[in-house]
Image (tube, rainbow, N blue to C red):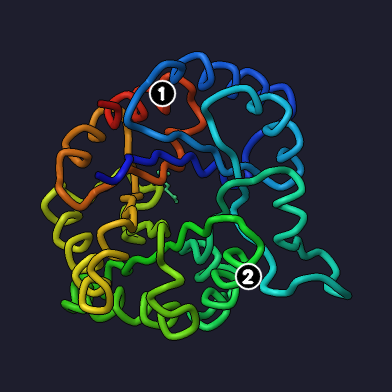
Amino acid sequence: MRQKLVVGNWKMHGSLAANQMLLAGIQAGVAGLTGVECAVCVPYPYLAQAQQQLSCSAVAWGAQNLSEQAQGAFTGEIGVAMLADFASRYVIVGHSERRALYGESDALVAQKFLRARSGGVSPILCVGETLEQRQAGQVREVIAGQLNAVLSAAGIAGFAGAVVAYEPVWAIGTGLTATPEQAQEVHGAIRGLLVELDASVAAGVRVLYGGSVKAGNAAELFAMPDIDGALVGGASLVAEEFVAICRAAAL
Ligand code: PGA
């Protein structure tokens, strides 16, 4: 059985003082939970703080982006070895904000996915359609295109133990959540696409849902057979909310 995974995506939020309180609250709140893995993806400058504060806890940490390059003259970029230096377990790859605001293409996202894997940091690959694409009936086609770009670079073997996050763009930060049935339909399609290539790899891939997940809607989402956890933005900045979501995923 796949262990549920709940990941906080802090985006560009935080300060040393605020993080200290938030991490302490999360750490205390999730202590002793079983059947769920909890993680926070923090802004780069706070990786050291996350490592220092969470090392002796059950909460993992990671980053929200990385360079597709290994190292070199790439001013302002952050390499996977640097993330690994701070014992990052996860890195978000291809978040819709990066695709839309920073022009990340499917091909670049695939390179980042490969780079994370080769550096020993688990990528959380984000896919999702816009409202226009949903209204045009293109959900499956869009998701398949985003997944296939990574599959053709990494192969199905590159998805062994991987994490995919389905984040409908129209549900991110809007308060609109996909219904559990809408989400399950896409999660099932994602797994179906992987099953066609390798059923046992597909069975091990955790598919998280993201988009306005809150304490109040988490349990019904987690009850769906192909929803293996959540990628949480806004609600991950409030310890009690994030802890409640982790609890909803626990056994
Ligand atoms: P949200 O963000 O939970 O604030 O909608 C989710 C995300 O962007 O990962």
Q: Give the residue at x 71% y 40%.
A: 47
Residue 196 spot, x, y in % from top left: 21, 78
Amino acid beneath label 2? Arg
- Residue bearing mark 2: 115
Residue 128 spot, x, y in % from top left: 34, 66
- Residue bearing mark 1: 243
Which picture quadrant has residue 79? bottom right
Comes first in the chain, label 1 or label 2: 2
Which picture quadrant has residue 40? top right
Inter-mark Cα distance, 1 to 2 = 31 Å
Q: Nearer the viewer, residue 181 or 154?
A: 154
Q: Give the residue at x 76% y 48%.
A: 85
Secondary structure at numbered mark 2 = helix
Q: Give the residue at x 57% y 65%.
A: 117
In the image, farthest residue toward the left: 181
Q: Give the residue at x 33% y 53%.
A: 206
Q: Is residue 13 above or below residue 199?
A: above
Q: Quadrant of the N terminus?
A: top left
Which picture quadrant has residue 76? bottom right
Rate crowding at label 1 as few (under 14), some (14 to 19) or many (20 or more) other CA atoms within 10 Å: many
Amino acid beneath label 1? Val
Asked if the beta carbon under badge 2 is closer than 8 A to the nearest atom of ligand 1, the reply is no
Asked if the beta carbon under badge 1 is closer than 8 A to the nearest atom of ligand 1, the reply is no
Secondary structure at numbered mark 1 = helix
